[in-house]
Image: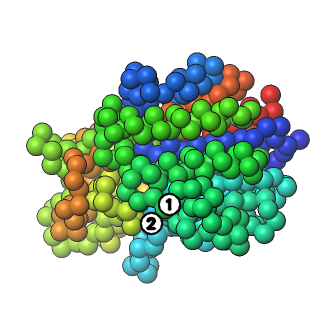
Amino acid sequence: MYLEINQRNYPSKINKPVVVICLDGSQKEYLDRASQSKLTPNLDKIVKEGEFILAHSAIPSFTNPNNISIVTGQPSAVHGICGNFFYTPSTNKEVMMNDPQYLRAPTIFQKFYEQGSKIAVITAKDKLRSLLGNGLNYNENRAICFSSEKSDQTTIEQNGIEKVNEWLNMPVPEVYSQGLSEFVMKAGVKILNEFKPDIMYLSTTDFIQHKYEPGHEIANQFYQMFDDNIGLLNDNDISLVITADHGMKAKTNINGDPNAIFLEDLLKEKFPQENFKVILPITDPYVVHHGSLGSFAMIYVENQSLISNVVAEIQKVPEIEEVMNKQEACSAYHLPEDRSGDIICMSSESFTIGSSKSKHDLSSLKEPLRSHGGLHEREVPFILNSTKSDITNQGQIYNYDAFYYATHMANK
């Protein structure tokens, strides 16, 4: 028997707990370097006994669209969340997409919950919580959903759990710290043992990856912490998939200054009489580690007859690798047309895209810029704790295939 969710079939009954982890910002090199330093024995064991392949993230390779892709099993053309926020030309408003009203597809959690399953969702940042928990009912003792960031504000009515800090014996972590992700992992271990969910999703944050390159001592400490908790989770008989929402690349010049093309400034220079709006979907309330500079941008062109001319002009910029009109981009990268700009751009591996230089406050960047959003950050790990998936014969795998394989493995 199968449960159809967003045009995909999942087992309607799961024989062991399913655990999917989104390890934010983690490309393969982070895991490799930590493993080489012998800091990840539990993860190494899982890889040896299971599968480790490289998957693609959804585009843009940002946190919100990829987390929602993972939990719906589909790209943003289906679920509608194509960035941390979007722009509506008719109202001239930029709107954060952290409200469930912008979701166009049910989550896997909602559909399994409706079938009687127990669900647990823990996220680092609260910006994702309401989206991930959409459709769950917290007064039946079958659902828990909360964030590390707002762990001191949990209630039974809103989260299915209360007094989380006392329960976990951990204070609310600093937002910009490893502690935010460590809280997620430790809570996941405790919830798996005590609440015994049928499906659990853990989503960390990429503060460490924005600041430190693979192999850095502090980055290695992060993956050692992760490995300790993975060992505790995998001591149970679970079906486990570990993936990431995106990778992370250095975006600086030889002096350590950010590499950025400010598209709004460039277009104003080339087309001084025209109006353009450059939208950077990486922008959210947490800009300390990236200054709203990512590798993906949408451009809205007031004079629609100029679109092909603007595309041609941007194509002359060597640091911008991908320039497409809306229809081409939405077809190639499975984006929702009504929430996409007239032109989509993605930069080269070591560059980011800004709007106007005057709109970016980079004073809070303490380390050389590391960021994401484009094609160079879409390759992510996809680790399964079993060889029963037959995944190596399936062609290109995406991070949003995680629950499909995790649920099917649970029944083999």
Residue at numbered disc 2: 85
Q: Residues within 10 Å of mark 2 (few under 14, many from 20)?
A: many
Relative vertical location of residue 20 with respect to residue 274 in this rendering, above or below: above
The secondary structure type at the circle numbered 1 is: loop
Nearer to the camera, 144 or 290: 144
Q: Residue at x 68, y 50 (%)?
A: 191
Indicate the colouring scheme: rainbow
- Mark 2 against mark 1, which lies toward the viewer? 1
Q: Residue at x 63, y 23 (%)?
A: 50
Residue at numbered disc 1: 171
- What percent of the width, then of the height, locates residue 258? 19, 50
> Which of the two discs, 2 and 1, labels the residue nearer the N terminus?
2
Could you tell whether 346 is left or right of 157 in the image? left
Relative vertical location of residue 90 with respect to residue 135 in this rendering, above or below: below
Q: Residue furthest right?
A: 1
Amino acid bearing label 2 = Phe
Nearer to the camera, 40 or 311: 40
In the rendered image, the quadrant that contains the N terminus is: top right
Amino acid bearing label 1 = Pro
Whether residue 341 is visible to the viewer of this picture, yes or no, is no
CA–CA distance between discs 2 and 1?
30 Å
